[in-house]
Image: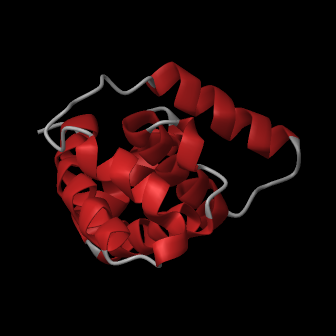
Amino acid sequence: MDPINKLDRALGLLRVRLAENQAKAQAGTAARQDQVLQSDPQRSRKTDRAGLLKRIETLRQFGVLDEAELQRAAVGYLLSEQFGDAFVNVPEFQLVVSMVHEELTRDTELGAALDTLITGR
């Protein structure tokens, strides 16, 4: 299984987890929760790898060289591709990005797949 398929599978599981986390969020975010919960958790978008690589390259050009930060940016990009850009600036979304990044890097195979993804190999 190639790195994209592994990440797509992980994103499917994370979609469900994000919906669960959103359901438990504070009452002030009820409108955003409804959007997430109403979306089809089985929906699948084709990942735009060229867009991801362009984003990573742009970050490198601006001096972001820390691999962990680049990995986290890749996770954020992939999640925004799956759930839409409306959530990117929401603090809960950034928390989920951090949690997903941490879980992916904990697993050796998924961490290697993430490395492969951001290096473009």
- Left or right for 119, reference 12: right
Q: Quadrant of residue 78?
A: top left
| Whole-percent x, y for residue 68 in the image | 59, 66
Q: Is 97 above or below relative to 46?
A: below
Q: Quadrant of residue 82?
A: top left
- Left or right for 76, reference 16: right
Give the residue drawn at x 61%, y 59%: 90
Give the residue drawn at x 49%, y 42%: 80
| Whole-percent x, y for residue 100 in the image | 39, 67
Give the residue drawn at x 27%, y 69%: 108
Q: Is 63 above or below relative to 4?
A: below
Quadrant of the image containing the N terminus: top left
| Whole-percent x, y for residue 115 in the image | 45, 52
Q: Residue lying furthest right in this view?
A: 62
Q: Is 26 above or below relative to 62?
A: below
Closer-to-camera residue (96/64)? 96
- Left or right for 57, reference 77: right
Give the residue drawn at x 53%, y 51%: 76
Q: Quadrant of residue 83?
A: top left
- Left or right for 46, reference 33: left
Closer-to-camera residue (95/108)? 95
Disc tally is 0
Display coloring: secondary structure
Quadrant of the image containing the C terminus: top left
